[in-house]
Image (cartoon, grey):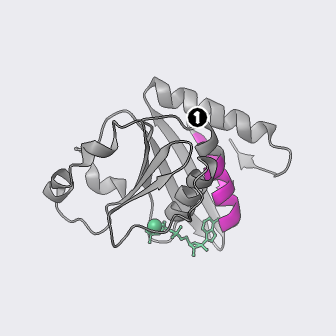
Amino acid sequence: MNILTVNTDSPEQTRALGAMLGNVASGDDLYLLAGNLGAGKTHLVQGIGFGLGVKEYACSPSFMIAREYHGRLTLYHLDLYRLDEIEEIVDLGIEQYFSSNAVCAIEWAEKGQGVLPAENLLIELTDLGGDNRRIRFVPHGNHYVELVNKLRESLSKDSLAKWNFQ
Ligand SMILES: Nc1ncnc2c1ncn2[C@@H]1O[C@H](COP(=O)(O)OP(=O)(O)OP(=O)(O)O)[C@@H](O)[C@H]1O
Ligand SMILES: [Mg+2]
């Protein structure tokens, strides 16, 4: 299996994990984040921004649906939480975010099932209680299998932090 599972025990560690993903990200990457309220999706995307060299602080786009940040690559940070109908997602012109040499990270991606590209990196976050979170990276498509391998390699090479992953 190519699924990578990482357990983090602080918001900072989740950000650091996101930064590692941002470091190995490439243009047109699509990350679908799924998980309950407060699971840590926004923290992970903040980290992805750091890894991409974004200087502004990524906040939750809840009131805007989409935010744009500029680093080594553009990062589109979307949040579908407030959208109730699949048509609203289609009306958003969501494809514009996928094919522009940018990295696109979508919170509450479950809501977009059916209109989001089949090739993507699904990131499932689970609150295990306290500050513990389980973060599963599930690649869909060869590109994302390679990306997850790179992320795994970065985790195993990192001597500064003790990563709990499998
Ligand atoms: N290991 C951890 N990783 C990430 N966040 C953690 C962790 N432990 C505790 N937290 C806390 O959990 C909350 C996560 O908030 P965050 O906004 O990232 O969640 P979210 O999944 O984006 O929620 P929402 O669905 O409301 O957008 C924060 O209050 C953070 O401090
Ligand atoms: Mg959020």
**In the structure shown, which secondary structural element does the residue marked by tag 1 occupy?**
helix
- Quick one: 7 or 55, which is closer to the camera? 55
Q: Is residue 91 above or below residue 148?
A: below
Q: In which quarter of the image is residue 159?
A: top right
The magenta stretch is: 4-19
Looking at the picture, how far across and down is residue 29, in whole percent? 45, 37
Q: Mark 1 points at which residue?
A: 148
Q: How many marks?
A: 1
* 53 on left or right of 42: right
- Quick one: 58 or 85, which is closer to the camera? 58
Q: In this view, does 60 lie above or below 89?
A: below
Q: How many residues crowd mark 1 within 10 Å: few (<14), some (14–19), many (20+)?
A: many
Magenta span has 18? yes
Magenta span has 12? yes
Tell me which residue sits at (49%, 48%) in the image. 123
* 92 on left or right of 135: left
Looking at the picture, how far across and down is residue 7, in whole percent? 67, 55
- Quick one: 131 or 50, which is closer to the camera? 50
Looking at the picture, how far across and down is residue 16, in whole percent? 68, 55
Tell me which residue sits at (49%, 68%) in the image. 59
Q: What residue type is labelled 1?
A: Val
Q: In which quarter of the image is residue 66?
A: bottom left
